Each structure stands twice: as C-alpha cells, then as structure tokens.
Amino acid sequence: MHDIVLLNDIYKIYTMGEFKVTALKGVSLSIKKGEFVAIMGASGSGKSTLMNILGCLDSPTKGKYYLEGVEVSRFSKNELAEIRNKKLGFVFQNFNLLSRTTVVENIELPFIYSKKISKNDIDKIHHIMRILGLDGFQKHYPNQLSGGQQQRVAIARAIVNDPTLLLADEPTGNLDSATSKDVMSVLTNLNQNLGITIVLVTHETDIAGYTRRVVVLKDGKVLSDTPSSSSAIPVVRAP
Amino acid sequence: MTALFKIALRAIKRNKLRSSLTILGIVIGVGAVIVMVSIGQGAKAFVEKQLESLGTNVLIIIPISTTHAAARGTTGIITLTAEDAFAMVKECSAISYVSPGIRTTTQVVYGNMNWTTGVSGAGPDYQIIRNWTLHGGRFITQQDVNTMAKVCVLGQTVVTNLFGALDPIDRWVRVNNIPFKVVGVLSAKGQSPTGQDQDDMVLMPYTTVQRKIMGVTYISYVLASSTTAESRFEAIDQITSLLRQRHRLRPNEENDFTVISQVEFASTVMETSHTMTVLLGSIAFVSLFVGGIGIMNIMLVSTTERTREIGIRMAVGAKEKDILFQFLIEATVLSSIGGVVGIILGIFTSKLVSYYGGWPSLLSSPSVAVAFLFSNMVGIFFGYYPAKKASRLNPIDALRYE
C-alpha cells in the first residue's frame, strides 16, 4: 500500500529582494492513510511552509510531493486549486469562516467550486453537523457562535468533501484550554471513527499528545519523527 | 455560475449606500444616452412627418427687402409679383406648378358668428402643390383668379367655428363687410408638425385678396413645386437666375428674394437636433466613463477589504476564474442596476423634455436594449482590472491578510 503523502527532499527557497531564505532544506516525509500526525517546531522552523506545501497552497522550489501517488509539486495554480477542492480540508487557527454568511453556507463552500449541490450533499451537511454537535445552528452567523463552535464549523467545512488529508494549522491557538480539548477530541474522533488522515501543526506539546506521531522540524529540516509519547492509543502501523 | 451570482448580489446588498453611490455615474450616463437617443429619434420622426405633410418638392419663394431700399429710408419695396410666378412655370423646366400667395389675418363673419383666422390668397395649383383634398364643393379656378371672384374655400376649423353642423357650401360669409360665397370645403389635415392647425384657414383667389381685402399689387410669396424631389436644386437655380433677370439685378447686387426648400428647412431642424445629440452624447460618454471609474474604484476597495474572503475561497478550491467571475459579476450587476435605473430616469426625463420643452421625443426598444448593453459593458470593462487583481492573489498571503 502506498503512502497518502510522500515528500521527497523538499526545498522551499523564498527570494526577498537580494536575500534568499531557505525555509525548507530537504524535508522527506511519508504519511499513511489513517495517520494522525503532529508537526512541531519553534517559529521559523519551517512548519508553516511545510503546511502550505502539504496543503497545495504553495509549491516546493525543489523536490517532489506525491499526494495519493500523484506528483503535485509541479501542478499549476488551477490544478492545485482543484486538488485543494477535492482532496484537502483546512482548519485554521483563526477559523477563517466567511462572516455574514450562514453556517450552512460556510460548510457547503467547497461544493460551490466543484458541482451543483444535490439533495445528497445537503443530507451530508446535516449529518456532519449532527456529528459535530452543530445541529440547530444552520442559519446562525459565525459571529453568533463561540470560538469552539466556530472551529467546529470550520472542521465541518474541511471534511464535507471527504478529503484525503485534513490539515489543521494551530487549530486550538485561539481557544481556551477547555475548548481546545473539545476541538481536539473532535479531531481525534474524526481520525479514529471516520479514518480521516490528519496532519496538525502545533507548538504545544499537550496538543501534539492527542496525535499518534510527532514530527519535529528545526531550521527547515526534520529533527525527529517519533510515535507520540503521551498518546493513549497505540500507534498503528500499516504492515 | 448561479452561485457566483448569489455571492455577487449578497455583496452588493451588504453595502447598499456604497453600491447606490457607485452606480450614480452609470445612472446619469445611461439616462443621458436614453434622452439623447429619444430626442434624436424624435427630431428625425418630426422632420419626416414634416416632409411628408409639406412635400419634399415644395419650394417657397419669399421677397426680402434689399439693403438698397433700406438705405433710402423706406421699409423696403416688395418686388415679387404674380407675373414672376407665371414666368417661373413658363421658363423653368424643373418647375411644374406655381401658386402666387398672399396672406393676411382678419375676421370672418357668418350670421352672428365670427372667427379670426388667416386668409390666404392662392392660385388653382395651390391644391396640387400642398396636396389638399376637398371635403365638398370645388377649389379656386383660374376664372375665379381672372375675375377676382368673391369666393372662398374654408378649412375645417373655420367651418366648425362658423357653421357648426351646417353645410357651408353656397352660403355667404363676410370679410371686411364684403360678402364672399363659400364654394368649397377642404378635408381636415390636422396639426402641422410644428403644432399649427392647418385647417384654420380661408382660401381665396390671390387677386381677390390683393384687390378686395388688402388693396395691394404685390404678392407675399410664391409656392412652387419642382418636378421631382431631386430636381429641387435645379429648380432653385433656375428660379434664382430668372428672378434676378426679371428684377434687373446687377451681378453685385444681392437677391431681393429667397428660395426656401422644405428639405433644407428640415435639415436645419436635423442640425439642431444633431447638436443636441452631440452635446448629450458627450455628457453620456463622460458620465459613463466617470461612472466606470467609480465602479473600478469601489471594486478595488472591495477586493482589498475582502482579501481574506478571497483567501478562504481559494483555500477551499476556488480557481482564478472563479474569483475573477465573482468580482466581474459583481461589477456587472452593479452597472446593470445603474443601467436599469438610468433607463427609467432617461425615459422620464425625455418625456419631461418633450412635454415642457415642446421637443419631440421618441423611444424605441432597441435603443433601450443598446443602453442596457452599454452599461453592462462598462461594468465588465472597468470591473475587469480589480477582478483580475483579486484572482491573482496568492492564497497564503490572502489568508494572512488582516
């Protein structure tokens, strides 16, 4: 069985005027289906850059990125948009919901750019909302919801297109510890019960503790790649 | 696409005041286009109606008092005579009919009724030149002219006002206390394009008007018709040289008459309306341009304000063209709303102009369609740059935008 994500010697070099900043210096990484991976590192370690590349928001300067066996590292902007739409889901630190747009409309956003919304899709949105405890908030606006609820809406939006990979960038960064726990248990549930592969960027060790594998970056390189120590669930490796 | 329309409409609704200020330029521009077109077309229709009613081959020769005469301290001597008119039809190959004319305004009396109207002296060919038909009786004959017969032909308005329901034929009316026998009644022609009642008139032999009513020997104009509409220029030349010769004008003397063609009169009207069209056209152009820039400006502000929204949309899979269309549709919907409001305003204004200004206006649905299309094009043209700029945003930067 092949890996969902395969990064092969990824470099990302930013040119700022005369300066060249190498954010990633040869990162190789493979992630299998159903994994729950935390990417950790100090600021400037390259974890955001890695996240952007994993999320097809950016292309690597050098190296190859295979997503489900397809090399996407040389895809055009439009092709990347298509990949994001079909295969990826995003959860951001600041939720990134459309204001003055209802919860349902926020969740169905990925569909707008791929197809006509069918009865099935509407049922699916309701189903997801029920799972995430958002029932009854369909017509609410994001600013009428608590931070935790907003993040659940963002999660609902991220999984509505059955993504191959769910990317969460500091999903608890703007939340208090109780709500953080709540959101993390939602993500853990999605991983365990629905088998959604999740990559999570965080700088908090206890948040990383919810995952089953921790990749630590330093200066644009992988410093360590270990099973999560505090995880209650044993790491399942594919044979 | 439907979804993109919904997004655009929602964005416009969100900023009602801003949106309405944005479309103001377009409203004025399209309004001016509508007024321009309706006045232009109205003038054209007016002229066509005028030509139709007066005839494209009708020429009017009127005397003008010369500077020479004015220098002698007189009000000028009128030199045009009935003989000039007959010479025209005899000598000028391009002239087929002439009628000497003289006109005065006086009171016509029947029984205890009276009516002040224009009395026109005419020859027998007047009926052919002006294309009158008779409602009853007969027209003025050559013999009436020769004998200065005390006969008259009445227009319908005069009949209504003097006789009511009576048949006026063979009854007698009095002008200057002289009895005139009514020999004919003209069919109604209605209003002239300039708004005059063409039926408010009494026709008599011109000799009768000259001698019995006014006591003069001159005539005040000659009506002539050229053989065809095209030969009118030839006819004007022939008349001019004939009259110069008959009036013994030296080469350095100015004409003591002028020849007016209905077509030339019509083209004067056309020129006036053309000037107005150009004026309104430039107003329309400038307002549409300024309106377009207004839309571009607001769209630039709007796309900057909504950078993060663009980033979110891109993150969930919006392609460049999706973002481009979203903002392009927004700009186009804005300008179309402006277009519709402008069309309504324009129709209202042109109705007002024709009502109070007495200027004819005519509006056709193609011109409305063109104005609407034009407003759309303004939206697309000026909305393209901001939309393109938005679509080119880098999703990472857009997501981080505060």
Image (cartoon, coloured by chain):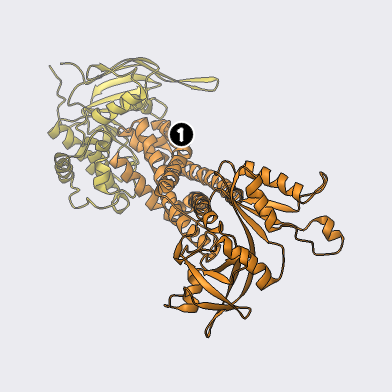
Reading the image, the residue beneath label 1 is B389
Camera-side residue of B225 and A188? B225
Circle 1 Cα neighbour tier, 10 Å, few/some/many (<14 / 14–19 / ≥20): some
- Asked whether residue A179 is in view, the answer is no
Camera-side residue of B353 and A229? B353
Camera-side residue of B143 and B134? B143
Q: Is residue A162 above or below residue B274?
A: above
Q: Is residue B265 above or below residue A239?
A: below
Q: Residue A76 at what x, y percent from top left? A: 35, 21
Residue at 18% x, 16% y is A2
Residue at 28% x, 49% y is A102
Q: Is residue B302 above or below residue B184?
A: above
Quadrant for the C terminus of chain A, please: top left
Mark 1, secondary structure of its residue = helix
Q: Which chain is orange?
A: B
Q: Is residue A52 above or below residue B179?
A: above
Hue used for the chain lettered A: yellow
Residue at 24% x, 42% y is A107
Q: In which chain is the residue bearing label 1?
A: B
Q: Residue B291 at what x, y percent from top left? A: 51, 47
Q: Residue B263 at what x, y percent from top left? A: 58, 48
Q: For the residue marked with disc 1, what is the amino acid?
A: Lys
